[in-house]
């Protein structure tokens, strides 16, 4: 079995590539390296190319016969999406449309798509499950929701089978410590905390302590990147026997505040995380926690990493090793 991994040089994609190889499935990575890292791909076949270049896609699909596609390529920063909406719609929507058309021309009928909690907008319930309304409040979330709608239309019109996986907060790294999260600039909480712990960055800025949460800081649901990869593998199996377009929310179902994360990271790193309270960051909801019962029921998904210290520990191991 051969699977195209678009964005396989990125954070979550690179963990997926490793998982596929481990399972005896041949991954072919397609990535423009705008944010990904060639080193993260390891020995897997690598094709440098861009979803916005149809010729790149034509060449790729004529060279390989894929059984399925996993699509991780995206711009994914909420704040940046508000500043540069066209870049988000172009990359995330138009790029995906090119991919879907190339798949159709090549008669490849299965796709696992990286979606996000940002499709929901303001949370209206304690746990966000798939019945929660989808009313994105920024271009990033809107771009991902648009693709979900495209996938439903493609299922009806062309019989495309798809699974959209809506990640809550992807976290951690391979326990081997040789691949992990590396963005430039880094905006995410866990790497920023660990940089502050290491002295690689000044004190962590805690964005707001006046939210409607027990300690005033934002609550998020951190899910390990290898558990996300596992859900993708299960989604591949699921599509073998299920037609149509499906969506699943992926999280641990447990919320941690920024201050709780700082405490946990300090214990993992065995040193206090220096921090200061800063103004709120635009677009941060108080609390985002997943209801993932549907993934557990229909995919048989059971996250292995449920202890936040263990999740942070894998990130810390990577952080001390980081080679890219
Ligand atoms: N935070 C800080 N300081 C930092 C970085 C983050 O206080 O230096 C806070 C944020 O304000 C937020 C929490 O830590 O409350 C987590 O922030 P991240 O940037 O790590 O992650 P987000 O929750 O903003 O982003 C995630 C996904 C996005 C998705 C978004 C939906 O990474 O893809 O949830 O809101 F769009």
Image (cartoon, rainbow, N blue to C red):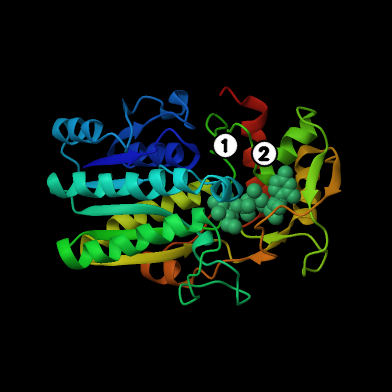
Q: Which quarter of the rendered picture does the C terminus lie within?
A: top right
In this rendering, position of residue 147 left or right of residue 167: left
Q: Earlier in the sequence, mark 1 or mark 2?
A: 1
Provide residue 5's location: percent of width, then percent of height: 33, 40
Residue under label 1: 181
SS category of the residue bearing label 1: loop
Q: For ligand 1, tell me if the residue under mark 2 lies within 8 Å.
A: no
Pinpoint residue 172: horizontal percent, then vertical percent: 59, 44
Q: Residues within 10 Å of mark 2 (few under 14, many from 20)?
A: many
Question: Of 165 and 209, which appears nearest the observer?
Answer: 209
Location of mark 2 (residue) = 191
Query: Alpha carbon of mark 1 to alpha carbon of mark 2: how far?
Result: 7 Å
The image shows a total of numbered marks equal to 2
Disc 1 crowd, CA 10 A, few/some/many (<14, 14-19, 20+): many
Residue in view at x 41 percent, y 71 percent: 297
Tell me if label 1 and label 2 are in contact, CB under 8 Å: yes
């Amino acid at each position: 079995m051969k699977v195209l991994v678009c964005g396989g040089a990125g954070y979550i994609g690179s963990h997926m590539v490793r998982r596929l190889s481990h399972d005896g499935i041949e991954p072919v990575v397609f990535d423009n390296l705008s944010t990904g890292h060639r080193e993260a791909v390891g020995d897997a076949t690598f094709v440098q190319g861009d979803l916005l270049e149809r010729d790149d896609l034509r060449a790729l699909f004529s060279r390989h016969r894929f059984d399925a596609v996993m699509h991780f390529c995206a711009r994914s920063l909420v704040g940046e999406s508000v500043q540069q909406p066209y870049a988000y719609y172009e990359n995330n929507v138009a790029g995906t449309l090119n991919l879907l058309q190339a798949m159709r021309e090549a008669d490849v009928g299965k796709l696992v798509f990286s979606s996000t909690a940002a499709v929901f907008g303001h949370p209206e319930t304690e746990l966000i499950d798939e019945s929660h309304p989808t009313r994105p409040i920024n271009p990033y979330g809107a771009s991902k929701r648009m693709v979900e709608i495209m996938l439903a239309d493609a299922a009806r019109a062309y019989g495309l089978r798809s699974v959209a996986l809506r990640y809550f907060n992807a976290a951690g790294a391979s326990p081997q410590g040789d691949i992990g999260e590396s963005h430039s600039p880094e905006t995410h909480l866990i790497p920023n905390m660990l940089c502050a712990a290491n002295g690689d960055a000044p004190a962590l800025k805690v964005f707001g302590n006046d939210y409607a949460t027990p300690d005033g800081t934002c609550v998020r649901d951190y899910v390990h990147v290898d558990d996300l990869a596992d859900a993708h593998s299960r989604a591949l199996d699921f599509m073998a026997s299920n037609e149509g377009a499906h969506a699943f929310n992926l999280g641990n179902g447990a919320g941690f505040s920024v201050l709780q994360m700082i405490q946990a990271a300090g214990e993992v790193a065995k040193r206090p995380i220096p921090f200061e309270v800063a103004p709120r960051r635009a677009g941060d909801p108080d609390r985002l926690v997943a209801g993932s019962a549907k993934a557990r029921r229909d995919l048989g998904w059971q996250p292995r990493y449920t202890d936040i210290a263990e999740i942070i520990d894998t990130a810390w191991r990577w952080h001390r090793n980081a080679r890219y």
